[in-house]
C-alpha cells in the first residue's frame, strides 16, 4: 500500500434522491472528514440535490447523475461508471439499497464498495455491512455507520447537518420577486410533503397559525415546490393574501437561502423540514404517518409534534382509516405555543 493511500481516501458516495435524506447524508460526510481531514469526498446524486451538496463544505464536488427516477438504464450506468475510472476512487459508499445504484461504482472499478446488501447485490457490493434496524433505528445512523470500519460503534454524538446559506442570494431572490428586504420577524411555513397527504397537516391549521403570526406583526412566508402551489395558494387565500407565497416560485437553492432569513419554521415531515433543521432554525416539525424516531430533525432547537396514536406510524401516503387523526388532532394552538 502506498503512503498516499494510507494517508487519505478518495471516496465516491452514491447519494439518495430525497432532499431530506441528502441533508442527513451530511452527517456521514462530516464523520468521514473527522476520521481524516484529508479524505476527498465526491457525491453522485440526482441533479436536483446538487444545491444541497454545494452548501456542504465537506464535499469536494457533486456529480449529477443523468438517469431518470426509477430508470434502470443498465448500459448507460455502465458507461457512466467507466467514465469515472480516471478519478481513481479508493472507496464507494452506496446510500441507497437498489440493485441499479450499485452498478455504477462496480463499472468504475472502485476497489472497495461499501453498503448494506440491499437488492441481492452480491459481487456489486464487496464490503457488505449488516443492517440491524434495532441498533440503527434512524436513517442518519445507517448512513454514518457505512463510513466507519466494520463492526465499529456509532459515535456518541453524531455530527449534525449544517448547511451554509448565502444571504446575498436570498436578497437577490426577493428582489427578483419584487419583494422588499424583511424588517420584521419571519415565520416560514412548509405545508407540503411530496410523499402524500398523510404527512400534511391541514391547510386550514397552517392558515390559523399564519393569521396569529400576522396579527403579532410577523411576516409569513410559504415555501413549496410547484406541486405545493394548490396548498400554498389556499393558505394565502385564507389569510387574505397577506403571506408571501413562494410556492413554485423559487429553486431549491433560493428556498434554502430564503429560509435562512426566517426566525421560526413550521413544517411537515418533508425535505424542507430537514433543510430548516440544518439551517439551525427554531423549528416545529409535525409528524403524521411517519416516525420521528426514524427521521427526526437533527437540531436541538426543534420541537416535534407527534401524537403516537395506536394507528401510527402507518407510513401510508393516504390515511387507511380515512380520518387522519394523527394530524387533525394536533391543534393550531399547540403549534402557535412554540413560536418564539
Image (cartoon, rainbow, N blue to C red):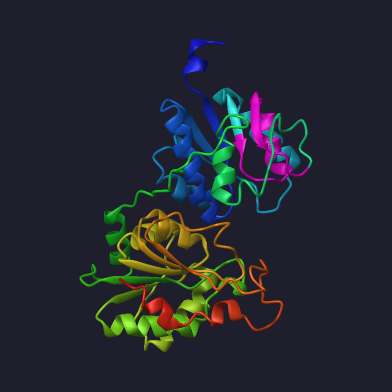
Q: Name the residue located 51 percent from the left edge and 24 percent from the top edge.
A: 9
- Quadrant for the C terminus in the image: bottom left
Q: Name the residue located 48 percent from the left edge and 85 percent from the top edge.
A: 204
Inspect the magenta stretch and tell me whether residue 45 lies in it: no
Q: Quadrant for residue 251, please give it.
A: bottom left
Number of numbered discs overlaid on the protein picture: 0
User: Residue 143's spot in the image, x, y percent?
Assistant: 57, 43
User: Residue 281's spot in the image, x, y percent?
Assistant: 35, 61
User: Residue 18's spot in the image, x, y percent?
Assistant: 57, 55
Q: Residue furthest left?
A: 183
Q: In the figure, 17 relative to 258: above or below?
A: above
Q: Quadrant for residue 291, please give it.
A: bottom right
Q: Name the residue located 53 percent from the left edge and 10 percent from the top edge.
A: 2
User: Residue 67's spot in the image, x, y percent?
Assistant: 65, 47
Q: Residue furthest top?
A: 2
Q: Nearer the viewer, residue 127 or 108?
A: 127
Q: Nearer the viewer, residue 244 or 285?
A: 285
- Quadrant for the N terminus in the image: top right
Q: Is residue 187 left or right of residue 49?
A: left
Q: Does the rendering let one see residue 246?
A: no
Q: In the figure, 54 relative to 312: above or below?
A: above
Q: Is residue 13 left or right of residue 30?
A: right
Q: Does the rendering let one see residue 190?
A: yes
Q: Which residues are magenta?
A: 93-119
Amino acid at each position: 500500500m502506498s503512503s498516499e493511500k494510507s494517508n487519505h481516501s478518495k471516496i465516491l458516495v452514491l447519494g439518495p434522491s430525497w432532499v431530506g435524506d441528502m441533508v442527513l447524508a451530511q452527517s456521514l460526510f462530516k464523520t468521514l472528514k473527522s476520521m481524516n481531514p484529508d479524505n476527498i469526498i465526491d457525491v453522485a446524486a440526482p441533479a436536483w440535490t446538487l444545491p444541497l451538496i454545494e452548501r456542504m463544505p465537506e464535499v469536494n464536488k457533486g456529480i449529477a447523475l443523468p438517469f431518470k427516477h426509477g430508470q434502470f438504464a443498465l448500459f448507460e450506468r455502465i458507461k457512466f461508471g467507466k467514465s469515472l475510472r480516471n478519478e481513481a476512487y479508493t472507496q464507494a459508499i452506496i446510500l441507497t439499497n437498489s440493485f441499479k445504484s450499485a452498478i455504477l461504482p462496480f463499472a468504475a472499478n472502485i476497489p472497495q464498495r461499501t453498503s448494506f446488501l440491499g437488492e441481492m447485490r452480491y459481487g456489486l457490493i464487496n464490503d457488505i455491512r449488516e443492517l440491524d434496524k434495532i441498533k440503527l433505528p434512524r436513517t442518519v445512523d445507517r448512513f454514518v455507520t457505512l463510513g466507519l470500519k466494520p463492526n465499529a460503534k456509532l459515535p456518541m454524538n453524531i455530527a449534525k447537518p449544517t448547511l451554509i446559506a448565502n444571504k446575498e442570494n436570498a436578497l437577490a431572490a426577493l428582489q427578483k420577486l419584487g419583494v422588499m428586504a424583511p424588517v420584521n420577524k419571519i415565520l416560514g411555513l412548509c405545508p407540503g410533503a411530496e410523499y402524500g397527504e398523510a404527512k400534511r397537516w391541514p391547510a386550514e391549521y397552517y392558515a390559523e397559525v399564519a393569521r396569529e403570526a400576522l396579527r403579532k406583526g410577523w411576516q409569513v412566508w410559504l415555501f413549496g415546490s410547484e406541486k405545493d402551489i394548490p396548498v400554498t395558494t389556499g393558505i394565502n387565500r385564507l389569510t387574505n393574501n397577506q403571506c408571501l407565497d413562494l410556492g413554485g416560485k423559487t429553486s431549491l437553492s433560493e428556498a434554502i437561502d430564503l429560509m435562512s432569513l426566517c426566525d421560526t419554521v413550521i413544517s411537515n415531515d418533508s425535505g424542507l423540514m430537514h433543510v430548516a433543521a440544518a439551517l439551525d432554525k427554531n423549528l416545529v416539525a409535525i409528524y403524521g404517518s411517519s416516525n420521528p424516531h426514524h427521521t427526526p430533525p437533527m437540531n436541538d432547537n426543534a420541537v416535534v409534534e407527534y401524537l403516537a396514536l395506536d394507528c401510527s406510524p402507518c407510513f401510508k401516503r393516504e390515511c387507511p382509516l380515512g380520518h387522519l387523526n394523527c394530524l387533525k388532532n394536533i391543534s393550531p394552538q399547540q403549534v402557535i405555543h412554540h413560536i418564539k
